[in-house]
Amino acid sequence: MAQADFEKESTANATWSRLLAGNRRFAEGKNEHPWQDPQTRESLIDRQNPDAAVLSCSDSRVPPEIVFDAGLGDLFTIRTAGQVIDDAVLASLEYAVDSLHVSLLIVMGHEGCGAIDLATHELDSMIDAATTDPASSLEAADAMDDLDERIAESESIILRSVGMSIWQAREAEVDDPADIERVHVAHTIEDLVSRSEVIQNALAHDRLMIVGARYQLSNGKVEVLSF
Ligand SMILES: [Zn+2]
């Protein structure tokens, strides 16, 4: 590994450690609210140099700057319900990687995600519709066989992304809600890597580290996921 690559990797690890330390402060009620003063704001007027990008849920209880006790200029954040990816999300992440040179990308799901409830409901409705209409049980079995195609072709982006994660979890006989949230984070990372050449390149050249995380509403802690 070239010296520059090594430095990039250690920067990503150091950033992640610093953010997790911030999360421990937050969970313990010892927030320092760093870098939120007028001097920091003024020092950032002409430029930004965030260390990390965060893709997380829009849920009002999960703001990354607060749960990581971070400040101005620290995090480039992209939030959608269920951290669902579309072209705008990919373009924003690619901007963070290529133009802002973030070395760390955090994909963060959370406990009690409403988008997962919604997708579960939509998926069950789709399964009900597929299995109750056919004239024979054989047709119903066929409908279940091509369920992944039906999900992939659905008009609902929540169903296509979160619903696909839930379906994959069910196929693997995972039914604990916390585990489904973890599977969805893993699936989201897979999806964004497969859809973005910019991110593939950054990973191939050790310019980027991607980590999965799950925020726990009940105790304020960010769980680090390993896949
Ligand atoms: Zn959510």
Image: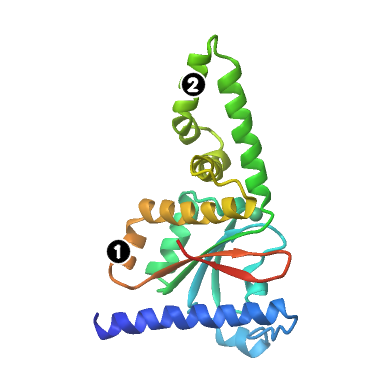
Q: Which mark is residue 141?
A: 2
> In the rendered image, which quarter contains the N terminus?
bottom left
Residue 191 appears in view: yes
57 over 175 or under it: above or below: below
Which residue was labeled with disc 1?
201
In the rendered view, would you say 97 is above or below 162? below
Where does residue 106 sit, x and y in percent of width and height? 50, 67
Decide if residue 80 is on the left or right side of residue 187: right
Single out the residue that lies furthest toward the top. Answer: 135
* Residue found at x 53% / y 66%: 54
**Quadrant assignment for the C terminus:** bottom left
In three-dimensional space, the C-alpha distance between marks 1 and 2, rounded to whole angstroms, equals 41 Å
Q: Is residue 79 above or below residue 138?
A: below
| Category of crowding for the residue at label 1, using alpha-carbon neighbours closer than 10 angstroms: few (below 14), some (14–19), many (at least 20) | some
Label whose residue precedes the other's in the sequence (1 or 2): 2
Q: How dense is the environment of label 2, judged by Cα within 10 Å: few (below 14), some, or many (20 and up)?
A: some
State the SS at label 1.
helix
Rendering quarter of residue 131: top right
Task: Kindly tell me whether residue 69 is visible in this rendering.
Answer: no
Residue plotted at (55% across, 43% down): 166
The single residue placed furthest to the front in the displayed view is 173
Horizontal and vertical percent position of residue 66: 67, 73
Near-viewer residue (75 or 37):
75
| Front position among marks 1 and 2 | 2
Q: Position of residue 94 (x, y in %)?
A: 41, 62
In the foreground, 126 or 32: 126
Q: Disc number at residue 178?
A: none
Rendered residue at 54%/50% (across/down): 84
Say whether residue 133 is left or right of residue 139.
Answer: right
